[in-house]
Image (tube, grey):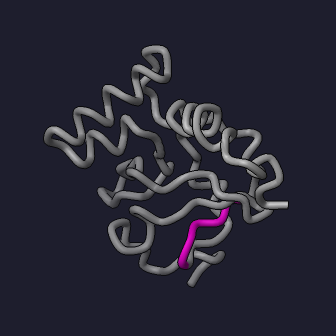
Amino acid sequence: MILGRPDPLRVEFHLLDRQIVDVDGHPVGKVDDVELTRDDDGTYRVTALLTGQYVLGRRVGGLLGRVLCWLGARLGGGRVEPVRIGFEHVQRVSSDVTLSLRAEVLAEQPLERWLRDKFIARIPGSGHAGG
């Protein structure tokens, strides 16, 4: 293992669908897809983690995937770009993916914001969650 990352790193096994947590252990989202870059020697390397409803919808495909894409775009005011987290910010890959930065510096997902504002906030005591 090199720098807290499995060697070799298998995208489908070590990254996809893993929980992403910030440096303080707060959940950020899940790895819905990855961005790969081809090096001059023909090998591929992971350059970013991608998370968000639109990315997940494209990966899932079919009717459910189209609904996720539509919902992500609708709640995001037409925005369909994923949250892109540069792989250089990945501190450790284990049962989750730990980042070297805080969640506040990342863009908030529209669906997560909507769920928090419309549902979670209405649950008695939810304002004290995690504390």
74 in magenta: no
Spot occupied by residue 103 in the image (x, y as percentages of width and height): 72, 47
Q: Is residue 36 left or right of residue 6?
A: left
Q: Residue at x 36, y 40 (%)?
A: 55
Give the residue displayed 53% in from the left and 30% down from the top.
110
Relative to 2, say whether 47 is above or below: above
Q: In this rendering, is residue 73 above or below 86?
A: above
Front-most of residues 23 and 42: 23
Image quadrant occupied by the N terminus: bottom right
Report the side of 4 relative to 33 (left or right). Answer: right
| Residue at image location 74% in from the left, 65% down from the top | 25
Of residues 127 and 31, the one nearer the viewer is 127
Provide the residue span drawn in magenta.
95-99
**Residue 125: x percent and y percent?**
78, 52
Q: Position of residue 49 (x, y in %)?
A: 49, 51
Q: Relative to residue 129, is residue 118 drawn left or right?
A: left
Q: In the displayed structure, would residue 6 be above or below residue 80?
A: below
Magenta part mainly helix, strand or loop?
strand
- Where, quadrant-wise, is the C terminus in this rendering? bottom right
